[in-house]
Image (cartoon, rainbow, N blue to C red):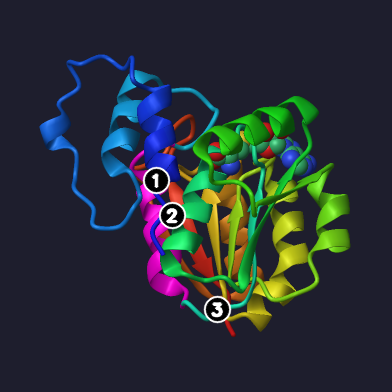
């Protein structure tokens, strides 16, 4: 199933973007991830609201190429903020045709929850996304009780918080033979990056770094725990 809601939303919301952006350089995609629109959005500003292009594309294709149309369980995002990456995850789920998967996203800040809902409504894409208010360390145990084939860890990036979220999700991720995807992991002193070193010491598994994407502490990483 193809849904162009996110493409339409971005085109409308960022119609004012500087026309000097070189659109011909934007990569082309046969899926409905609006790579061109995301490229323009990246060019218009850099702040901590979301991770921007090309990290969105990496995340989108990780879900799109790793999961199957009949995959079941929960897609998780910790840290919704304005719901921008939630839209990318939801678009990947829809393009996959995986109607037995649900996206559950967790956010502590009530203003951000409101803003995310407005964005999803504008994108005509959030009807099936569930948002869980509160601190993930309390809400994950209450709301996650089925296999998790994909989790995006992006709330508080302190080492101990990242580790605590992962430990709460890990039994469900292992059950689904799933993957964990992390933002802000670059460089020796990035707290989320240190959490990954500790995770590998504790649990082994396969860790891949993508240093040249995302912003304000760049870097994405993907970790597959040992089955
Ligand atoms: C980097 S932003 C998330 C960006 C979003 N994932 C995206 O890519 O569009 C981090 C968010 O995590 C939220 N947050 C921080 N600590 C949290 C916690 N303990 N529980 C739930 N949400 C938390 C913040 O309020 C903030 O909105």
Q: Where is residue 44 in the image (x, y as percent from the top left)?
A: 34, 19
Q: Write down the residue under mark 3.
A: 71
Q: In which quarter of the image is ligand 1?
A: top right
Is residue 184 at all visible to an observer of this figure? no
Distance of label 2 from label 3 (alpha carbons): 17 Å
* Callout 2: SS: helix
Main secondary structure along the magenta-highlighted residues: helix
Inspect the magenta stretch and tell me whether residue 54 lies in it: yes
Residue depicted at 54% across the width and 46% down the height: 125
Q: Position of residue 43 (x, y in %)?
A: 30, 24
User: Considering only order in the chain, which callout, 3 or 2, is on the residue closer to the N terminus?
Assistant: 2
- In the displayed structure, does residue 18 sit left or right of residue 85? left
The circle on residue 172 is none
Q: Write down the residue under mark 2.
A: 59
Q: Measured along the vertical axis of the image, is residue 159 above or below residue 30?
A: above
* Callout 3: SS: loop
Give the mark toward the camera: 3 or 1.
Answer: 3
Residue depicted at 34% across the width and 36% down the height: 38
Is residue 90 at all visible to an observer of this figure? yes
Q: Measured along the vertical axis of the image, is residue 177 above or below residue 104?
A: below
What span is in magenta? 52-68
Residue depicted at 88% across the width and 52% down the height: 138
Q: Is there a contact, CB below 8 Å, between mark 1 and mark 2?
A: yes
């Amino acid at each position: 199933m193809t849904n162009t809601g996110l493409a339409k939303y971005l085109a409308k919301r960022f119609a004012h973007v500087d026309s000097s952006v070189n659109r011909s350089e934007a990569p082309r995609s046969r899926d409905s991830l609006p790579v061109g629109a995301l490229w323009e959005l990246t060019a218009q500003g850099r702040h901590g609201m979301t991770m921007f292009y090309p990290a969105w594309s990496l995340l989108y294709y990780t879900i799109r190429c790793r999961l199957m149309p009949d995959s079941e369980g929960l897609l998780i995002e910790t840290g919704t903020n304005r719901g921008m990456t939630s839209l990318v995850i939801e678009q990947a789920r829809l393009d996959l045709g995986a109607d037995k998967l649900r996206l559950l996203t967790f956010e502590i800040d009530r203003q951000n929850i409101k803003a995310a809902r407005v964005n999803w409504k504008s994108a005509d894409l959030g009807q099936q996304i569930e948002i869980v208010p509160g601190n993930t360390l309390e809400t994950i145990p209450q709301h996650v009780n089925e296999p998790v084939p994909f989790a995006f860890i992006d709330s508080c990036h302190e080492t101990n918080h990242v580790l605590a979220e992962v430990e709460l999700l890990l039994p469900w991720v292992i059950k689904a033979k799933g993957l964990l995807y992390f933002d802000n992991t670059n460089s020796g002193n990035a707290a989320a990056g240190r959490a990954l070193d500790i995770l590998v010491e504790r649990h082994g598994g396969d860790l891949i770094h993508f240093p040249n994407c995302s912003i304000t502490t760049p870097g994405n990483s993907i970790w597959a725990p040992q089955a």
